[in-house]
Amino acid sequence: MKKVAFVLSLALSATVAVAGANAGTGKATTLMVKELPDFPGKDGMVEIVDFAPGEVSQPHRHNADLFVYVLEGIIVTQVDGEEPKSLKAGDVFYESPTDVHVVSRNASATEPAKLLVFYVKDQGSPPTVLVQHDHK
């Protein structure tokens, strides 16, 4: 029984730590983290990211390959060196571990937006890192 409580407390701590790592980039809810046996040292992670109406994230990058599906709303997204894109429910996009995400915002001042995000990341690394960036 003590082992079960210990394992559950570790899992809860990991989820809280992962959600905290996404501060400033929408409200992230981790749904699953799973070691990928065919890719040693890598985890697959699935999250829902909610953006409140008008919410804008801070510049950031991910320690992961990221596959993103827009579940609801409209998101304006831009990685450094590319033009901004408006993506609506049903659209998808990808970010590499080297991309700096300079713009990520909910395009609506009245409606929420929601993303489904799948990460392939290094085990033990935070999925998201805030960065200093002077957007031009």
Image: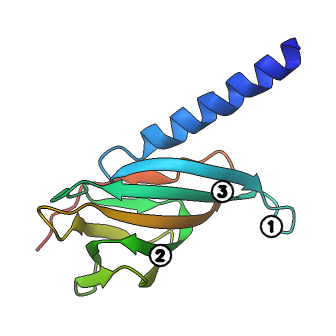
Q: Residue 39 carries which label?
A: 1
- Residue 124 at x, y percent in the picture: 65, 45
Which of the image's four quarters has the C terminus? Answer: bottom left
Q: Which of marks 2 and 1 is in front?
A: 2
Q: Which quadrant: the N terminus? A: top right
* Mark carried by residue 122: 3
Image height of 12 relative to 56, above or below: above
Amino acid at pointer 1: Phe
Q: Position of residue 8 (x, y in %)?
A: 73, 26
Residue at position x 41%, y 47% from top? Answer: 22
Sequence-first tag of 1 and 3: 1
- Identify the amino acid type marked 3: Asp
- Secondary structure of the residue carrying numbered label 2: strand
How was the colour assigned to the protein in this rendering? rainbow
Q: How far apart are marks 1 and 3 (CA)?
A: 10 Å
Q: What element carries label 3?
A: strand
How many marks the image carries: the answer is 3
Marked residue nearer the N-terminal end (3 or 2): 2
Quarter of the rendering containing residue 133? bottom left
Q: Residues within 10 Å of mark 3 (few under 14, many from 20)?
A: some
Residue at figure coordinates x 43%, y 71% from the top left: 71
* Figure check: 126 above or below 44: above
Pick whichever of labels 2 and 1 is earlier in the sequence: 1
Task: Give the foreground label among 3 and 2.
Answer: 2
Residue 56, given in percent of the width and then of the height, sits at: 20, 58
Q: Mark 2 points at which residue?
A: 69
Disc 2 crowd, CA 10 A, few/some/many (<14, 14-19, 20+): some
What residue is rendered at 43% in x and 83% in y?
90
In this view, the residue in front, 11 or 21, is 11
17 left or right of 3 in image: left
The correct choice, above or below, for 43 with respect to 91 in the image is above
Residue 74, given in percent of the width and then of the height, sits at: 26, 75
